[in-house]
Image: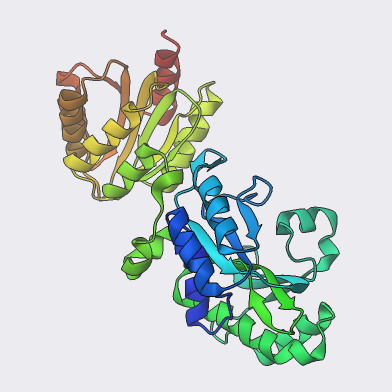
Amino acid sequence: MKLHEYQSKQIFSRYGIPIPKGRVASTASEAKSIAEELGGRVVVKSQVLVGGRGKAGGIRLAKDPAEAEQLATQILAMEIKGLPVRKVLVDEAAAIGQEIYLGITNDRAARKPVIMVSAAGGVEIEEVARTNPEKIIKSHIDPLLGIKDYQTRDIASSIDLPREYWKVFGEIVKGLWQAYSDTDATLAEINPLVITQDKRMVALDGKMLIDDNALMRHPDLAEMRDTDEDAPAEIEARKYGLTFIKLDGNIGCMVNGAGLAMATMDITKLFGGEPANFLDIGGGAGADKVAAAMRIILSDSNVKAILFNIFGGITRCDEVAKGILVAMDEVKPKVPMIVRLVGTNAEEGRQLLSNAKMITAETLADAAQKAVNAAKGI
């Protein structure tokens, strides 16, 4: 789950990371009032969950409250990469002396979190990695020990940070690590972390990604979710605890288990088909959950056939079959459906589906071939 800049910076502030004075506004008049409170030049920043806001004109400098109101009016009427701007962050303007990139994310290869720091701040880190990878300093974090003082000193020295800033830099790095760890984040990023001309170190921008699987531990963070960038089907899937990702193909897939879902998609492609989605109903799915998954798949007009591949371990095959039949009664599908059931109560499930004159298959290869042919109208 992505957090907006203002949400990320609010979290950073709780961990002692200095951020600019400012507040979020939903209207131009609110933006003007905030600018008046801050007194002086402000930055009006669109709050959308995409990159490239500055290039799109979504970040503007205002010299006074009247201009802040004018710019907020323009920005709030914008769409950036297809997403509407509903809020702006009005921050005090900073006189920037130096920009630094600072981020923490997971290094899956090393099986540890990693700090990434670059003196080339203010630029997308992917661009720095592509053009000047040597400018990115990395240091892995032992999740049991956390960040040690020597690490922050080594990093500060590696980016030629003036020694007078080493202490505050170390405190910011430790604060970012604590925020990252406590929120179950997969990314916590400050870009840029600036040294101002009056010798302060401030996080001018912030970005956090939270692990969806950990949101049950963070109901306060779950409430921050912005659904503007989510497809309606993905929003609906979350309500039922389904894992759903829309793809560009025309064969809908409903599977229980992420590994089995990947194998189903691979075999579908092997026989010349294109999956329309990744959908994992998980273990123990009852008829209501299966029916919800069916409705979500059928909401995609590109779907020409649906392939069900269910292994009945925790999930009983007869319950899945009942769910399919319930969904058929509700949705009235007009596309062929191919079902492969194996495992607990598979025979009972297949009997239910046979009575409804549905296409069944014994093996995954057979099911995939039938689905591909059905999607082609064969």
**In the displayed structure, does residue 6 sit left or right of residue 95?**
left
Taking 219 as reference, is 48 above or below it? above
**In the displayed structure, does residue 157 sit left or right of residue 366?**
right
Q: Nearer the viewer, residue 106 or 132?
A: 132
Residue under the image location 57 percent in, 81 percent down: 17
**Looking at the rendering, in which quadrant would you find the C terminus?**
top left
Taking 365 as reference, is 262 above or below it? below
Taking 76 as reference, is 143 above or below it? below
**In the displayed structure, does residue 62 sit left or right of residue 248?**
right
Judge whether residue 351 can be spotted in this image.
Answer: no
**Which residue ends up furthest to the top in the rendered image?**
378
Image coords of residue 266 (percent x, y):
52, 34
* Colour mode of the rendering: rainbow
Image coords of residue 46 (percent x, y):
55, 54
Residue under the image location 32 percent in, 17 percent down: 336
**Looking at the rendering, in which quadrant would you find the N terminus?**
bottom left
Residue under the image location 35 percent in, 25 percent down: 306
**Which residue ends up furthest to the front in the rendered image?**
66
Image coords of residue 291 (percent x, y):
22, 35
The image quarter containing residue 366 is top left
Taking 44 as reference, is 289 above or below it? above
The image quarter containing residue 151 is bottom right
